[in-house]
Amino acid sequence: MVFIDGTVVNVALPALQREFGATAAQVQWIVESYALFLASLLLVGGSAGDRFGRRRIFTLGVTLFGSASVWCASVDSIGQLLAARAMQGIGGALLVPGSLALISASFPEDVRGKAIGTWSGWTAITAALGPVIGGILIEHWSWRYAFLLNIPFAAIVLVLSFRFIPAGERNRTAARTDWAGAGLASGGLGALVFGLIETSSSGWNDRHVIGTLLLAVIMLTGFIVVESRHPSPMLPLHLFRSPDFSGANLLTLLLYAALGGSLYFLPLNLIQVQGYSAVAAGSALLPFILTMFALSRWAGGLVDRYGAKRPLVVGPAVASIGFSLLAVPGVGGSYWLTFFPAVLVLGFGMTVCVAPLTTTVMNAFDTDLAGVASGINNAVSRIAAVLSIAVFGVVMSIAFRHAFAKAVAEMQVTPSVVQQAMAQENRLAAIELPETTAAAEKEAIRAAVANSFVHGFRWVMLLSACLALASSISAWLLIGRNTAQANGPR
């Protein structure tokens, strides 16, 4: 459920924007409200399961997620949808760490790796199938069915949970849950994302933007202070003394920021500019997912053969080429000659580095800290996507406005039509003109909108390429220093 909803909604965004007449900022919040709570509460969800009972917290997460999915499918305003998506994120934060904890507790050590591998494999499969299934539902019925898809899954999971998972007792000796840290992290990240998104429409000098960004700095600083003093923090800061762990998380932050931000805008480009159907847009990333799924075992063997550092340098560098190739296509052209090569190269680059990245994180510490380290790295990858969508939104907005203003100034179009189009700049590629507009003028504006969006999209892809290249450099500088320090000077 969590991984389907992490991918299916991107394909639904054009339909949602059209139905609710939403701005680009409101569409961003459809993704951000879900991802924000999922990312910021992921670590505290795991500790809550330890303290209050894993099955109890896991089934609570499933129930919240299922209920929120019904709410998402029945909303009649953009505000209601944002609230329902936030509730989905909270449910997911309780559900994801609980699922892994239950697997670890239910299988002996000799088969636990295979069980976790099966869990990981199904996440890849559902991530791949989510946009395709969602595209079919959206194209032939309604975007609302993309959320209702979760209901039978939730019902099955609850039945299986109460049938097969032992209830377990509360661990009253478990460490106290870091609610203060969770609140400050959620509030600080939320204020930061809100401030960045609002700059697209209000500008950097707006007092609300300045106040929100200042609040974000205060809350995130408070979060660091609380984590440094809490007896059982959700983010143990001392772990970052390890160069391998710090390097792996810096790589994760940069690379997954590039991936999350770019994959947010790609479906919008395919559907609103290139004219793809929802099904075709959902299927466009299948080469990426299938490459990762088919070659993940081979990529895992690279660590045994070459160590983790080389794949972590090469993989992001190849991914950087893939992002650069996504900046090449204009408007039109065959998928196989425009987006397919880029998606394939990007998928290969990500495949090379994902398994070594996980290995580096898990091997940075002894076994008793491996779970905490993995949880932090998972949260970092999600936070990276949350922040990058907000930042890339600013980049896209600035680039689009500049290119669109230049385009309309050079065309022979009635001033009233130009004013109608310019008034909708905050909708980006979803700009629509009245039916009474002359066909030639409407076509000219559409071409200007498409070319302006592609201009902004290219900036986003090139920024993604730079972030991926920076992640490769961070691996070169930091990964492997743990071993060097352990060996000492020769």
Image: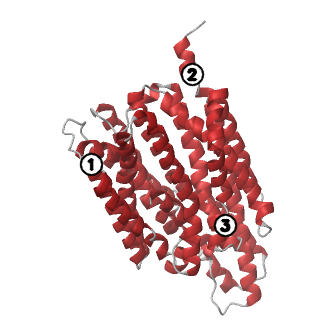
| Image quarter of the N terminus | bottom left
For marks 2 and 3, the one nearer the N-term is 3
Rendering coords of residue 98 (x, y %): 35, 48
> Where on the picture, by quarter, is residue 379?
top left
Q: Give the residue number, with chain letter if any, for mark 1.
A: 166
Foreground pick, 306 / 90: 306
Q: Secondary structure at mark 3?
A: helix
> Where on the picture, by quarter, is residue 331?
bottom right
Marks 2/3: CA distance? 41 Å
Q: Amino acid at mark 1?
A: Pro
Q: Amino acid at mark 3?
A: Asn
User: Mark 1 touching mark 2, by CB under 8 A?
Assistant: no
Relative to 279, residue 260 above or below: above
Q: Secondary structure at mark 2?
A: helix
Point out the frontmost of discs 1 and 2.
1
Residue drawn at 27 percent across, 48 percent down = 166
Q: Give the residue number, with chain letter if any, for mark 3.
A: 269
Q: Is residue 329 left or right of residue 3?
A: right
Q: Give the residue number, with chain letter if any, for mark 2.
A: 481
Point out the frontmost of discs 1 and 3.
1
